[in-house]
Image: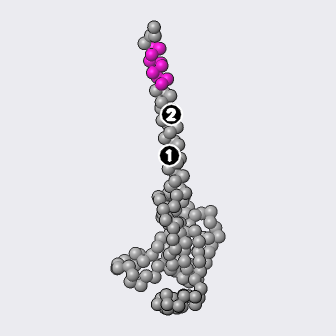
Amino acid sequence: MTTFSERASSAKRSANKFFRRLLVVVVIVFIGVMFFLYYGTYSSGVRAGVVLKVSERGMIFKTHEGQLDILSFGAVKSDNQLSQTFEFSVEKSRDELIKQIEDVALSGERVRLRYEEKYAVLPWRGETKYFVTGVERMESDERNKPQDQKEKFPN
């Protein structure tokens, strides 16, 4: 026959075992969610325009942020000039890409920015969900053609 104290210690061991297993499951789920948010890509695409600024920002986590003027010329129906800009982030480890974006920002030339949209903003990574992955400089003859000629006479 078991005594009350033996049953209590058995129940305590069972509870401890349950909570340890629960903690392990919660930690594994948390790690999985963080991997998904960090590496998962919601969409990718290209935006064209002129880079207005590139800056390193943040108090604790230094991130590289920028703005691209889309130059939509009324395509966006808004009186707010900021609605025609595309805000983006660049991963800190991409030094060559940051240098290229700084160069095109100083030259004022029209560029295409390839980007990936992530599911969430993580403060140590950037202030936006949009991360630039590449820069393509537009050819000089392509920049100087009117928009209707670009569509009618492709190269």
Q: Is residue 26 above or below residue 101?
A: above
Q: Which residue is mark 1?
A: 30
Locate residue 98, reporting x and y percent.
60, 70
Q: Position of residue 153 (x, y in %)?
A: 53, 91
Is residue 11 within the magenta segment?
A: yes
Residue identifier under label 2:
21
Query: Does the image show residue 56?
Result: no
Q: Nearer the viewer, residue 125 or 119?
A: 119
Mark 1 is on which residue type? Answer: Phe
Q: CA distance from mark 2 to mark 1?
A: 14 Å
Looking at the rendered image, the quarter that the C terminus falls into is bottom right
Q: Can residue 48 be seen in the rendering of this structure?
A: yes
Q: How far from the left and from the top, in percent, is residue 39?
A: 55, 57
Assign the magenta stretch its main secondary structure.
Answer: helix
Please, what is the three-letter code of the amino acid marked with disc 2?
A: Arg
Which disc number belongs to residue 99? none
